[in-house]
Image: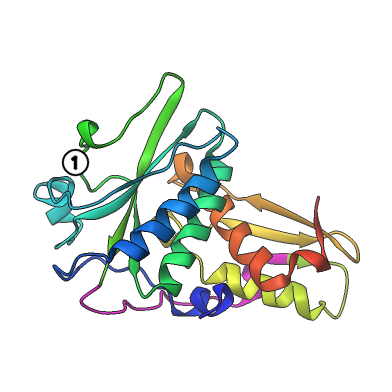
Amino acid sequence: MTLQEAIIARHSVRQYETKPIEPEKIAQLQSAIGEANADGRLHLQLVTDEPEAFAAGLAKYGKFSGVSNYIALICRKGEDELLGYRAERIVLQAQTLGLNSCWVGLTFRKQPNRYTIADGETMHGVIALGYGKTQGVQHPLKPIGKFCKSNITPLPDWFRRGVEAAALAPTAMNMQKFEFQLLDNDRVAARTRFSLAGSYLKIDLGIVKCHFEIAAGSENFRWA
């Protein structure tokens, strides 16, 4: 499975089997996380065999069950967009390994003894990982015109592919408050719109830019 195929296959999953993630897959995830953290701007951390974060309380409200593996989403202040971009790429890599996932902002209980948050860093949530009891369900899709604007017609195929992939991306409360603008033949601007989930907008922007770039092909455009 390619990353582009993973964009289509991946859906948010909240109920998981007790099956552990194989060591070789954990090694691949750790490698991807190491690459994401390499420049010191992010501090993503894989936590395995830890069921307490989703054992009770808010997790039950969020209808989570069976979660014992997750990625702690930790980064320096101001790096929210980068966190969204790089962590979503790991989510898609996990999908290629046959793993399911779900971005979680609030409905879990912090377990500070299982990860490290350094001075100047903030934890923005976790990504649940594992073998889902189902493959999840695609959220309702909107026309791509809801997510883009351009004075250039017809839209280039690569731009259309990018926006379509972005529309498949997970966002806080599925609000999808983003927009892509084709400024000229190869320059693209990505922006957020007002949302009640404003604290997650930059993370969402990074997630949708990840999807756009994979589907559009980085060789076809440059970010404005």
What secondary structure characterizes most of the magenta part?
loop
Q: Residue at (16%, 51%) from the top-left corner? A: 54
View extreme (top): residue: 119
Query: Residue 111 or 40: which is nearer the viewer?
Result: 40
- Left/right placement of residue 113 relative to residue 136 reads left
Q: Relative to 104, does residue 167 appear above or below in the rendering?
A: below
Query: Residue 148 or 30: which is nearer the viewer?
Result: 30
Please provide percent x and percent y for residue 92. 48, 66
Q: Relative to 156, does residue 58 appear above or below in the rendering?
A: above
Colour scheme of the picture: rainbow
Element on which disc 1 rests? loop
Query: Residue 57 or 31: which is nearer the viewer?
Result: 31
- Left/right placement of residue 176 relative to residue 146 reads left
Query: Residue 71 or 103: which is nearer the viewer?
Result: 71
View extreme (right): residue: 185
- Left/right placement of residue 209 relative to residue 111 reads right
Specify the amino acid type for callout 1.
Arg
Q: Relative to 180, does residue 43 appear above or below in the rendering?
A: above
Q: Residue at (54%, 48%) from the top-left corner? A: 35
Q: Which residue is mark 1?
A: 109
Q: Is residue 68 magenta?
A: no
Please provide percent x and percent y for residue 53. 18, 46
Q: Which segment did they paint magenta?
A: 132-148
Q: Is residue 138 magenta?
A: yes
